[in-house]
Amino acid sequence: MDYQQLWTQTKDEISHSIEQFSFQQTFGEVKTVLKMQNGSIYVLCPNNLIQRKLNTLYINQLNDILETLTSERLRFKFVTSDEVAPKEEVTEKKKDYLFKSNLRPEYTFSSFVAGDSNKLARRNAFQCAQEGANAANPLYIFGGVGLGKTHLMQAIGNQMIDDDINKRVLYIETQEFIDDYTKAARSNKFDTFEEKYSNLDALLVDDIQMLSDAPRTQEQFFSIFNKMYNDSKLIVIASDKPYNKLNIMDRLTSRFSWGQIVDIEKPDQTLRVQILKRKVSETTPQIVPDEVLEFIASNFTSNIRELEGALRRVLAYAVAFDLDVTLDTAKEALKTLIKVQDKNNDNNDFEKLISIVADFYQVDVADILSSKRNAKFTTPRHICMYILKTKYELTFKKIGSLMGGRDYTTVITAVEKISQQMVLNKELELAITTILKKIG
Ligand code: ADP
Ligand code: MG
């Protein structure tokens, strides 16, 4: 993506709607894109006056235009040269285009609702965002699927960058780290790898348990860890297990205990209701009675992603059938999902699988179980069926009924399709490997 060009095009577009003289006055000297980081394209302004003008008069229109030019979720941020560290010579050609934080802007501390199960983790994370390695190094966060580990660790990164745009923060899924290293090692070319993983102010490594099958990558991570640790740069690690239960070399895991270890537990009913309340106020003008929120909260207890998905489903159901959001509406909308949960009281493999797949593809469990035909949902749906067949060896009929009451022939077709595509499609193969590893 050429961010410089995006700015130039946006400017060109807005020039049609502004009188030429004032366009020249405001935009004439606003030419240079410094970098893209964390979803923001940083544009250099010649002085505060222009910066203020852009921020008050034009920012919304500019971001609207930007949205039409790219499918990436981006926005402009206007800065002056005194906000940029002197060492980052702004007039020089060397630009940080390649540096991507990988952070999702919505994962912030303010959107993270605190309760008994996560407040200690939140407090420690916030301290790390403010004081870096001085607060704790590394910060090791662990807990089950969908409890907020990724959200919290990204909040640290977002906060650091918000406080200082020059901070280089990198969020990385362990699988991506493994892939980067494997690629570099295979071709014996380490420049891109080195560039990506050096000179960081903070490195946030998610799902570290996935490192267990990659001994050589463990060595590499060990050396990056040591370097950062010695330079007092913050390392944050998230995992679904305590550090001493990881299947990773002791040399490395013992270092994980040098800093602060925090766990996130399952949310209690109070926190679940609070999270739902907050979601409602953020996303919809619909009125949702407390008893509905309490009903949802008491049926989706072990995973916040699913909890939010259930709420979205109720709201969408009410809109689709033009109903008020009442307890009856909620019960009707969630009927199939709640049945799925009941079925799995004796066996939660299915629940775990589907929530891992949903998490991987960033979609709702409800959508995977629905009959929506959008590829965004059919691929994860078919992958679930494929894994239920090949790993858990369930009958096609049983899979059909678990997956929202589908005919067994549909399941057969889906499983065959995935088996065939896996051979040709590297990305799909990698997705399935990753999911299988997460299931453990
Ligand atoms: P994990 O990484 O532990 O599997 P995530 O961080 O991906 O979990 O969280 C799953 C979903 O739940 C995300 O959409 C996240 O924003 C939301 N979530 C988790 N904890 C909270 C919280 N305390 N407040 C608000 N949203 C939360
Ligand atoms: Mg996660």
Image (spheres, grey):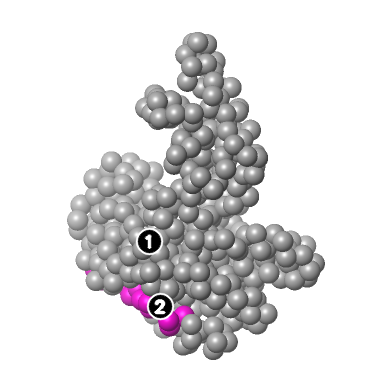
Q: Quadrant of the N terminus?
A: top right
Query: Residue at the location (38% across, 48% down)?
Result: 316
Residue sitting nearer the eye, 372 or 321: 372
Residue sitting nearer the eye, 84 or 329: 84
Query: Residue at the location (39% across, 43% down)?
Result: 320
Look at mark 2 in the image and give the residue it sits on.
Answer: 259
Magenta stretch: residue 55 in it? no
Query: Residue at the location (68% across, 69% down)?
Result: 181
Quadrant of the image occupied by residue 124: bottom left
Question: Is disc 2 surrounded by few (<14), some (14 to 19) or many (20+) residues within 10 Å?
Answer: some
Residue 171: tell me if it is visible. no
| Dot 1 beta carbon under 8 Å from ligand 1 | no
Q: Which residues, given as a range, are shown in magenta?
A: 256-269
Quadrant of the image occupied by residue 431: bottom right
Query: Residue at the location (64% across, 75% down)?
Result: 220
Magenta stretch: residue 259 in it? yes
Residue 129 is marked as 1
Quadrant of the image occupied by residue 126: bottom left
Per the image, label 1 sits on a secondary structure element best described as helix
Left or right of 350 in this view: 69: right
Indicate whether 124 appears above or below 309: below
Residue 169: tell me if it is visible. yes
Q: Quadrant of the C terminus?
A: bottom right
The kind of residue tagged 1 is Ala
Q: In the rendered structure, are the residues bearing label 1 and label 2 in contact, judged by CB atoms less than 8 Å apart?
A: no
Residue 355 is marked as none
